[in-house]
Each structure stands twice: as structure tokens, then as C-alpha cells.
């Protein structure tokens, strides 16, 4: 139950983030948007840390504030470098392509995640996972329609960002075993803020009026999306999380139709149906795994 609640929060947050990115497209540079997003996130997280330390006196919070091993710091740096590149490509695609197409191209992430997680996290590749990802990929192909619709430069950039997202997600799973979600988010803001600032200095333009509102929306929704995703990763393997993430497509397609007059075509319905079936298979695989774990724990208790 906890997995699906956290994933629901992540899906909603990522969709709101996409709306904010679309609203700011062409008004501010992508690097500046990412920089200010990190600054807003850092301010928000600082308030959260202050409240926790002042009123709740969280022991876990104090533990995360101590000196971290060099290996963990390097892992944070590695994750955020690829995550920044992925976000840059994602924002680029949001400004040029229909929202549903950007999300569809992004959903090649499970393919890359499966390969990366198998090699570096030693995660078991089950038949159900392979089938779920296969059906999800067919759904993406039904929407993008290679050979029928022209895949332009923006599409290639979004595909490249998907690979970077896969690396980032896999690293997040590794960090989540020892680091709290808040710590992961804090490092994300601290590391990505100077990267965005450095890349945007030559074209810096101070935001005005409504732009600040959308930047705040981007900053808060990005934090909530990654917090929910990090919490969800504590309940399941990274490949299962990304498979469930397919639900973002029909959600963002509806947003595109309602707010940006984007076409809701039959290939999108077919692709969405394939992804839904894949998700159901992935959920079934997760449920079976939990039942097996409970049975094993019960057997252990009975033998003691």
C-alpha cells in the first residue's frame, strides 16, 4: 500500500513539474530555470531541517549531518551530474514536443534501468519484469511511430536524457539503502545549483511576476516528486518503480489535451493500453514477491 501511495505522489508531482516547465519555455534559459529551482528547493529543505531539528529533535537528522564517507559523496556527485543532464534534456523536449510524446520517449528509461540495475545492483530479472517492460516499450513505439512519424532532434535529445535518468534512478536506489530521502534531495540542490548557475551566468535574466510563481511550482514539485520516488524505492526494486511510473503517460496526455489543446490520438490510446497491461503484470510480480517473503519469514519463525 505504501508503495502505491508514494508513487501516486510522484506521478502527480512530475506532471505538475511538466506544466511549470512548459509555461516557462522560451522565457528563461533551461540552465537558469534549473538553477533557481535548486535554490528554491534548498531554501525549502533548509526550513524543513530547521523545523525538524528545532521541534522534533530527530536523531536520524543529526546522523545525516555528520561527515559522510568519501564514497557516498562521490555517489551523490555522480547521481546529480547525470540527473542534471537528464533534466536539461527533459526541459528542452517539453518546450518543443507534445507533453505525451516527451513522457513516452522518457519511458524508454526502464529498458536502460533494467540493464544498469542488473549489472551494478545485481537485481534479479524476472520473466514478469521483462514482459512488463516489453509491453511498455511496445506502447512507446505505438505512440512515437518510428518510420511513420519523423523523429526530430528534440526527440533524440529526450531519448539521451532517458539514459541519464536511468543512471540517476539506479544510483538513487543505491543511495536509498543508507541515505534518507531528505539527504538525497539536499545534495541534489547543493550540487545542481552551482552547475545551473555556471551555465546560465552569460544569459541571466531576472524573472518577473508570474515567472516566479512557476519557478516556485517547479522547485516544490521537483522536491516532492523525488522525495516520493525515493520513498517508493524503499518498498521495491528500481525496475519495479520505473515500470509503475508508466502511469504518468495517460495522466500527462490528459493534461496536454485539457490545457494545451494537444491531440489525443488513437496510437496514444493503444500505447497507453499496452503500458497499463505491463504495469498490471509488474504489480502482480511485486505482490508475488511480497507473499514469498512473508511465507519465508513465517517458515523461519516456525523452525525456531
Image (cartoon, helix red, strand yellow):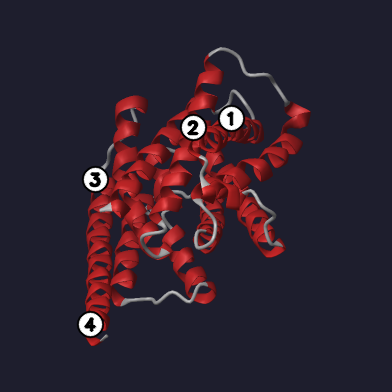
Residue in front for this viewpoint, 166 or 259: 166
Label located before the other in sequence (3 or 4): 3
In the displayed structure, would residue 262 be above or below residue 267? Answer: above
Query: Residue at 63% across / 18% down in the picture?
Result: 207
In the displayed structure, would residue 47 be above or below residue 86? Answer: above
C-alpha distance separating marks 2 and 3: 34 Å
Residue ID for mark 2 = 220
Residue in front for this viewpoint, 253 or 195: 195
Residue in front for this viewpoint, 151 or 19: 19
Q: Residue furthest top?
A: 209
The answer to whether mark 2 and mark 4 are in CB contact below 8 A is: no
Question: Which mark, by number, is residue 266?
Answer: 3
Residue ID for mark 1 = 40
Label located before the other in sequence (1 or 2): 1
The answer to whether mark 1 and mark 2 are in CB contact below 8 A is: yes
Q: Secondary structure at mark 4?
A: helix
Question: Which mark, by number, is residue 299?
Answer: 4
Quadrant housing the C terminus: bottom left
* Figure quadrant of residue 147: bottom left
Residue in front for this viewpoint, 221 or 202: 221
Amino acid at each position: 500500500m505504501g508503495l502505491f501511495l508514494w508513487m501516486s505522489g510522484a506521478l502527480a508531482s512530475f506532471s505538475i513539474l511538466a506544466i511549470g516547465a512548459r509555461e516557462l519555455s522560451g522565457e528563461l534559459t533551461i540552465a537558469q530555470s534549473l538553477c533557481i529551482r535548486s535554490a528554491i528547493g534548498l531554501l525549502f529543505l533548509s526550513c524543513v531541517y530547521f523545523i525538524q531539528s528545532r521541534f522534533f529533535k530527530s536523531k536520524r537528522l543529526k546522523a545525516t549531518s555528520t561527515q559522510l564517507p568519501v564514497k557516498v559523496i562521490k555517489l551523490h556527485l555522480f547521481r546529480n551530474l547525470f540527473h542534471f543532464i537528464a533534466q536539461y534534456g527533459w526541459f528542452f523536449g517539453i518546450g518543443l514536443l507534445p507533453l505525451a510524446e516527451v513522457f513516452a520517449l522518457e519511458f524508454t528509461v526502464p529498458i536502460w534501468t533494467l540493464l544498469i540495475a542488473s549489472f551494478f545492483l545485481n537485481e534479479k530479472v524476472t520473466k514478469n519484469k521483462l514482459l512488463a517492460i516489453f509491453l511498455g516499450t511496445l506502447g512507446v513505439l505505438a505512440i512515437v511511430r518510428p518510420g511513420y512519424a519523423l523523429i526530430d532532434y528534440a526527440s533524440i535529445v529526450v531519448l539521451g536524457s532517458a539514459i541519464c535518468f536511468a543512471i540517476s534512478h539506479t544510483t538513487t536506489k543505491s543511495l536509498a539503502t543508507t541515505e534518507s530521502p531528505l539527504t538525497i534531495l539536499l545534495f541534489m540542490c547543493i550540487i545542481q545549483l552551482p552547475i545551473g548557475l555556471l551555465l546560465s551566468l552569460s544569459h541571466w535574466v531576472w524573472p518577473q511576476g508570474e515567472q516566479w510563481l512557476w519557478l516556485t511550482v517547479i522547485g516544490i514539485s521537483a522536491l516532492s516528486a523525488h522525495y516520493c520516488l525515493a520513498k517508493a524505492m524503499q518498498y521495491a526494486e528500481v525496475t519495479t518503480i520505473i515500470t509503475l511510473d508508466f502511469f504518468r503517460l495517460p495522466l500527462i496526455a490528459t493534461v496536454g489535451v485539457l490545457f494545451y489543446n494537444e491531440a489525443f490520438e488513437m496510437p496514444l490510446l493503444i500505447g497507453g493500453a499496452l503500458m497499463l497491461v505491463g504495469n498490471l503484470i509488474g504489480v502482480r510480480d511485486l505482490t508475488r514477491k511480497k507473499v514469498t517473503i512473508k511465507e519465508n519469514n513465517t517458515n523461519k519463525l516456525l523452525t525456531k
